[in-house]
Amino acid sequence: MGSTAVLTCTVTLDPAFGIAPVDPRLFGSFVEHMGRCVYGGVFEPGHAEADTDGLRADVLKLVRELGITVARYPGGNFVSGYRWEDGVGPVADRPRRLDLAWRSVETNAFGLNEFMTWAQRAAVEPMMAVNLGTRGIQEACDLLEYANHPGGTYWSDLRRSHGVADPYGIKLWCLGNEMDGPWQVGHKSADAYGALAAETAKAMRQVDPSIKLVACGSSNDRMPTFGAWEATVLDHTFDHVDYISLHAYFEKHEDDRASFLASGLAMDRFIDGVVATADHVAAKKRSRKKLQLSFDEWNIWYESRFAGYTNLEWAEAPRLIEDEYTVEDAVVVGSLLMSLLRHADRVGVACLAQLVNIIAPIRAESDRPAWRQTIFHPFALTARYARGTVLRAEPRTPSYDTARHGDVPVADVVATHDPETGQLTVLALNRSETEPVNLTAQLRALPGLRVVEHVVLGGDSAELLHTNNAEDPDRVQPRTSTEHTLTDGELTAALPPVSWTMLRLAPTA
Ligand code: AHR
């Protein structure tokens, strides 16, 4: 990038050109039995803020503020060795088990019914995963019968005997987790998994035809089987599932901030690749179905700092991957949400992984109230205000070269327009490490708006590595900016270097 030229980004936003309505399920998250996400996170009997069910009220308050709509449960790698029956019924009778995925001791004090109580209090939709690692069709159907069948059968009556008279009616179900990964307990070939997933899907739909099913795609797009895995799995499952999953974790490698700031492009490419594969299978099958994508694990994870699955000591709720996020991480999380929104026509579910303590927007300790990590802020703002329809945006802006992603546009813009309220939300990213970008958005097709909110994360090079932590939990917060104009249908705003911006406009009258 040149250091003296003024950087610009121009874009035209017109409600006549929309990509798709924003599915509220894009703002999901993930609660896994891993480390301190459940135990010491959402659930901590004895904590000063715990209610009579052991659910932490301070965590619940932040979960509601974060605005998540969906919570995926109970894993993750954990689910591939999980016996769901261990987690229901009288707590005193529940077995302690080895969790092979995380070399942890699982007490089973928290299970399906505790999770559903939590989900109801958090006002989030549950998304359940079934174990297709060590188990199969029967156990998946038993769980679905326990959860969703009204009564008069063994499993539904067992639920009723556990004090839950009404069926939960859980709609979203994942057919296993990351079954392409050799680390997965019960890892399978694409053919073996595809065949099992198709038969499980058919049987589960016999139990409850109203459910939506997610087949496992690749664990990330660096997997050697990426592309081929999706094609084979969908050859088996295409007619029986509603979604194919994607997982991706990003991190800054060797201080290469330029590439890190372009993580959204990698997410775009990953999504485009899976869409292409799903549409290839549709073409082969002469099907008009546009299969939806479930990006049910995404975030920043400094995986290179993780000692690895096999180097862990057996322990109850050990401290695992409690990454502390910086301002620049928050800027990247904001940009990843922009990538998801840009694909609103195909991505129908997305889950920020995870929710509490484990690579999470919310942190919790036993001796103090829970707090917001830096990445909490772009998520909460996007979840609250990026509603309505995503507008087609073609930003024109210079590009720069990166080691990992080649040529990358210096700025990015995504906008949503809510026809009900008339509100326009503009999300913008400046990837330049040194220069501001002058954003100009033509809004002539959206007359009568005024800027009601302009907030920025980042923009000060001295603060990019600041974090929120137990000692200083509110150090990083979005700051309000007045550096914008709106005249004759033209919105201008200054985007500071390395920043994520949200401009919210509402009708004047
Ligand atoms: O979120 C942490 C782990 O990352 C999940 O258990 C697994 O699905 C993924 O590899």
Image: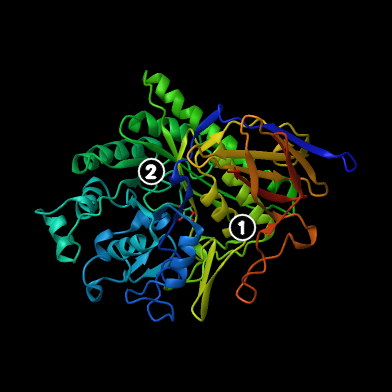
Residues at marks 1 and 2, CA–CA distance in whole angstroms: 27 Å
Query: In the rendered image, is residue 36 in sight?
Result: no
Hey, what amino acid is under mark 1?
Tyr
Marks 1 and 2, the one that precedes in the sequence: 2
- Point 78% across, 34% down: residue: 398
Q: Nearer the viewer, residue 10 or 263?
A: 10
Residue 203 falls left or right of residue 212: left
Left or right: residue 163 compared with residue 418: left
Using the image, tell me which numbered label, if any, was put on residue 90.
Answer: none
Q: Secondary structure at mark 1?
A: loop
- Front residue of 232 and 487: 487
Q: Are marks 1 and 2 in contact (CB under 8 Å)?
A: no
Residue 201 placed where, x, y %?
28, 39
Q: Quadrant of residue 242?
A: top left
As displayed, is residue 112 above or below residue 70? below
Which label is found at residue 188? 2
Pointer 2: residues within 10 angstroms few (<14), some, or many (20+)? some
Horizontal and vertical percent position of residue 435: 82, 46
Amino acid type, mark 2: Lys
What's the residue at 55%, 32% (across, down)? 272
Above or below — where is 490 with respect to 71?
above
Residue 119 falls left or right of residue 161: right
Q: Position of residue 308 (x, y in %)?
A: 54, 60
Q: Quadrant of the N terminus?
A: top right
Name the secondary structure under disc 2: loop
Residue 302 has which mark? 1
Q: Is mark 2 within 8 Å of ligand 1?
A: no
Q: Quadrant of the C terminus?
A: top right
Would residue 439 be found to the left or right of residue 106 on screen?
A: right
Residue at the spot 48% in from the left edge and 56% down from the top edge: 67
Q: Quadrant of residue 377?
A: bottom right
The answer to whether residue 45 is above or below residue 276 is below
